[in-house]
């Protein structure tokens, strides 16, 4: 619950929750997109490394970054839907 300007406590409304969910989903997608940019840069950097073992390790780490980005995308899509809750005004304590 939160306290509004009127001094009443209230539960988040469905609209508030939906916008919060949308912001969370957008942030998760943005994070995944940025990880994919990092992953591509890591693969490019790996190509310039003469030591084959180090080059392979950097490619492996880049692939792990890709897996993390994919996981974040999936979790963003799987966020639970908003729960409809009615606002319940009541006087704030104090």
Image (cartoon, rainbow, N blue to C red):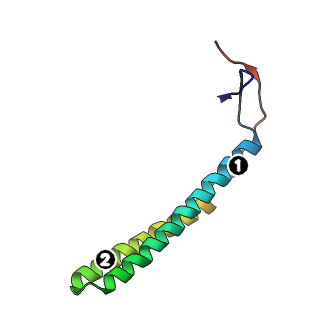
Question: 88 left or right of 70?
Answer: right
- Quarter in which the N terminus is drawn: top right
Label 2: which secondary element: helix
Q: Identify the image quadrant of residue 47.
A: bottom left
Residue at the spot 75% in from the left edge and 20% down from the top edge: 90
Task: Return the residue at label 2.
Answer: 58
Using a 10 Å C-alpha cutoff, classify the residue at mark 1 as few (fewer than 14 neighbours), some (14 to 19) or many (20 or more). few
Q: Residue 71's x, y, as percent?
A: 51, 65
Identify the mark at residue 19; answer none if there is no mark.
1
Residue positioned most to the top: 94
Res. 7 visible in picture:
yes
Q: Earlier in the sequence, mark 2 or mark 1?
A: 1
The reply, left or right, for residue 39 in relation to residue 12 is left
Mark 2 is surrounded, within 10 Å at the Cα level, by few (under 14), some (14 to 19) or many (20 or more) other residues, namely: many
Give the image location of residue 17, x and y in percent.
Answer: 70, 44
Up the image or down, 44 lies above or below 80; here it is below
- Residue 20 lies, in percent from the top left, at 66, 47
């Amino acid at each position: 619950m939160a306290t509004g300007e009127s001094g009443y406590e209230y539960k988040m409304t469905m609209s508030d929750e939906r916008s919060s969910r949308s912001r969370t989903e957008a942030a998760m997608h943005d994070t995944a997109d940025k990880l994919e940019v990092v992953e591509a840069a890591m693969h490019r950097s790996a190509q310039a490394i003469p030591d084959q073992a180090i080059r392979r390790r950097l490619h492996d780490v880049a692939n792990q970054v890709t897996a993390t980005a994919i996981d974040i995308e999936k979790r963003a899509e799987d966020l639970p839907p908003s729960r409809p809750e009615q606002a319940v005004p009541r006087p704030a304590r104090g």
